[in-house]
Amino acid sequence: GAGVSQSPSNKVTEKGKDVELRCDPISGHTALYWYRQSLGQGLEFLIYFQGNSAPDKSGLPSDRFSAERTGGSVSTLTIQRTQQEDSAVYLCASSSGTYNEQFFGPGTRLTVL
Amino acid sequence: DQQVKQNSPSLSVQEGRISILNCDYTNSMFDYFLWYKKYPAEGPTFLISISSIKDKNEDGRFTVFLNKSAKHLSLHIVPSQPGDSAVYFCAATGNFGNEKLTFGTGTRLTIIP
């Protein structure tokens, strides 16, 4: 069956440019999460969408980062005016129900030159 | 402030022996704990979880132990197999799994044939 998909798989951009990362969750999953993993670090929570509730944005590192989830399905993470410290693997996960197991996509590797 | 800690960045174990991966946490509000396994260039995959109402959960070769008083959990893999070589992340969450995951920095497990 279809898992969580993310695009692009790799993105190289120049400092100061904006980037958009896309996540297609598992169909029917009500919760969607964005994390990132910087070199040598664990996974860092960014933002969490649950159904129609207001998203939990507590993990976003700056106001250059934003995310939306349209129609309760696809999500886009946008990073404006990228900086070199934004270079990381950005991972999306989705889940459904209590005792949720979060299913992760393969990630987008972002490199800011 | 690292709320979930994996103090061993790497571990090597002989094939067939037991692998023990450790994890400590500081947040008393965590009530659900998970282990994820990650291969290079892939997203993490769920391995096993445990609720704070239990102290042990077993699934085939994998067993997770939780010591709430010590705020410590461990993952036992026995017998270890070459395919177990991966990075293992410990994660914790509240509200019995309905919240964002807080991850440790991971332990790279290498199984020596």
Image (cartoon, coloured by chain):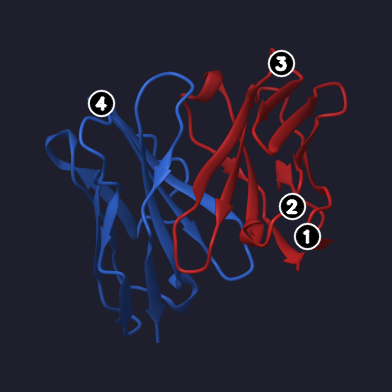
* Mark 2 closeness class: few <14, some 14–19, many ≥20 residues within 10 Å: many
Any idea which chain is the red one in this picture?
B
The residue singled out by tag 2 in the image is: B80
Q: Quadrant of residue B63?
A: top right
The residue located at (60%, 35%) in the rendering is: B48
Determine whether the residue tagged by mark 1 lies in a helix, strand or loop: loop
Q: Please state which amino acid type lies under the numbered disc 1.
A: Glu
Label 3 sits on residue? B54
In depth, the one of A37 and B65 nearer the eye is B65
Q: So how many labels did they put on this image?
A: 4
Say which of marks 1 and 4 sits in front. Answer: 1
Please, which chain is the residue tagged with disc 2 on?
B
Q: What residue is rendered at 76% in x and 44% in y?
A: B78
Q: Secondary structure at mark 3?
A: loop
Q: Is residue B89 above or below residue A19?
A: above
The amino acid type of the residue labelled 4 equals: Gly
Q: Are marks 1 and 2 in contact (CB under 8 Å)?
A: yes
Amino acid found under the numbered disc labelled 3: Lys
Between marks 2 and 3 in the image, the one whose residue lies nearer the viewer: 2
Residue appearing at x 55%, y 57% in the figure: B38
Whole-Å distance between the Cαs marked 3 and 1? 29 Å
Alpha carbon separation for disc pair 1 and 4: 44 Å
Residue underneath mark 1: B15
Chain letter of disc 3 in the image: B
The x and y percentages for residue B33 are 63, 31
